[in-house]
Image (spheres, helix red, strand yellow):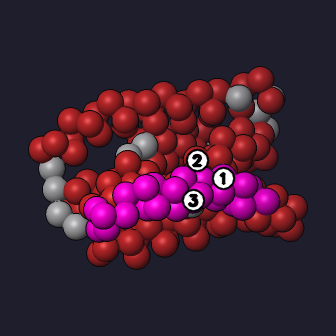
Amino acid sequence: MCHVGIDVGTNTTAPKLLIERLGMSLNDAAFATSLYFIFRTAGCLTGSFFLRVMNNRVFFAISVVMMVLSMLGMFFGTSKAVLYAAIALVGYGNSNIFSIVFSQALLSVPERQNEVSGLMIMGLFGGTVFPLLMGFASDSVGQAGAVGVMAVGVIYLLYYINKVKH
């Protein structure tokens, strides 16, 4: 749920953040979504290599730390470079979260793979919950509120690091 919520949330919040903080036009700020997907794609490609040679927990922790740094950058950043770096970090960091969580879930109950798979796909529901909460938060306090909602998901992923098996 957190992965999809952060994914959808970044796509909707990143351009608005650039407009709010830097006064960019919508056309210029739309690049933020492309930047996110460029780094998400790069993360998926390199992640397939890293997951073969690196411990799952270590790679998951590195990915989550990237997202923590990203949330800090998006929350406090006021320069174009910091905000672009934060958007790139969340793209790269979030790129392999679902695959690690999905494989961990399937390995934890191998005799119930169909049920586990169904439950994991239900987790995609986060893509609808997070943006709703982010909308309420951004209406109240601006885009920092939306980033705060995503940060709650990242904090949960920090907690989840200890549950990831090697």
Q: Quadrant of residue 47?
A: top left
- The residue wearing badge 2 is 7
Give the CA separation, mark 3 to mark 2: 13 Å
Q: Disc 3 or 2, which lies upstream in sequence?
A: 2
122 in magenta: yes
Crowding near the residue tagged with mark 2, few <14, some 14–19, many ≥20 C-alpha atoms within 10 Å: many
Tell me which amino acid carries mark 3.
Gly
Residue 19 position within the rendered picture, expressed as x and y whole percent measured from the top left: 77, 40
Mark 3 falls on what kind of element? helix
Residue for point 31% across, 73% down: 163
Q: Quadrant of residue 69?
A: bottom left
Label 1 near label 2: C-beta < 8 Å? yes
Quadrant in which the N terminus appears: bottom right
- The residue wearing badge 1 is 127
Mark 2 falls on what kind of element? helix
Pick the front one: 142 or 112:
112
Quadrant in which the C terminus appears: bottom left
